[in-house]
């Protein structure tokens, strides 16, 4: 939650083969939001995490509440696998 509120950033689990341009396009298509910057990393488990910083026009907390399966008790990384399931499976 701190990352959402302080940095206006969402974290997604994406396909290991997805590049930053594809992630940006998928986020724009699925959630109708613009992002300023995307950082990625591969976890020791072999998953690819994408940190998506939203533009100033969008609030990450509002977007997180719209994401399928969002609940205050869940971590953003756990519930945002929707982008992976929809675009690359």
Image: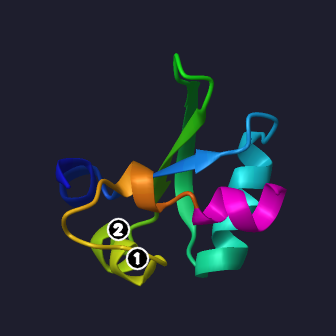
Q: Magenta-highlighted stretch: main secondary structure? A: helix
Magenta stretch, residue numbers: 82-89
Give the residue displayed 42% in from the left and 75% down from the top: 69
The label shown at residue 11 is: none
Marks 1/2 in contact by CB < 8 Å: the verdict is yes
State the count of labels.
2
In-image side of 84 versus 9 (left or right): right
In-image side of 20 versus 81 (left or right): right
Residue 11 falls within the magenta-colored stretch: no
Return the x and y of residue 1 as percentages of the image width and height.
20, 55
In-image side of 45 versus 60 (left or right): right
Q: Which residue is mark 1?
A: 63
* Residue 10 quadrant: bottom left
Q: The C terminus lies in which quarter of the figure?
A: bottom right
Q: Secondary structure at mark 2?
A: helix
Give the residue displayed 73% in from the left and 43% down from the top: 15
User: Few, some or many C-alpha atoms within 10 Å of disc 1 (few <14, some 14-19, many ≥20)?
Assistant: some
Return the x and y of residue 44 as percentages of the image width and height.
52, 16
Q: CA distance from mark 1 to mark 2?
A: 5 Å
The image shows residue 23, relative to residue 17, as above or below, that is below
Give the residue displayed 28% in from the left and 71% down from the top: 61
Q: Which residue is mark 2?
A: 60
Return the x and y of residue 5 as percentages of the image width and height.
20, 59
The image shows residue 21, relative to residue 68, as above or below, that is above
Residue 84 falls within the magenta-colored stretch: yes
Q: Secondary structure at mark 1?
A: helix
């Amino acid at each position: 939650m701190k990352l959402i509120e302080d940095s206006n950033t969402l974290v997604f689990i994406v396909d290991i083969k997805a590049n930053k341009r594809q992630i940006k396009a998928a986020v724009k298509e699925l959630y109708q939001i613009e992002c300023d910057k995307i950082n990625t990393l591969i976890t020791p488990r072999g998953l690819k995490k994408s940190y998506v910083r939203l533009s100033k026009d969008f609030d990450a907390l509002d977007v997180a509440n719209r994401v399928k399966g969002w609940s205050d008790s869940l971590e953003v990384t756990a519930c945002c696998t929707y982008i992976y399931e929809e675009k690359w499976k």
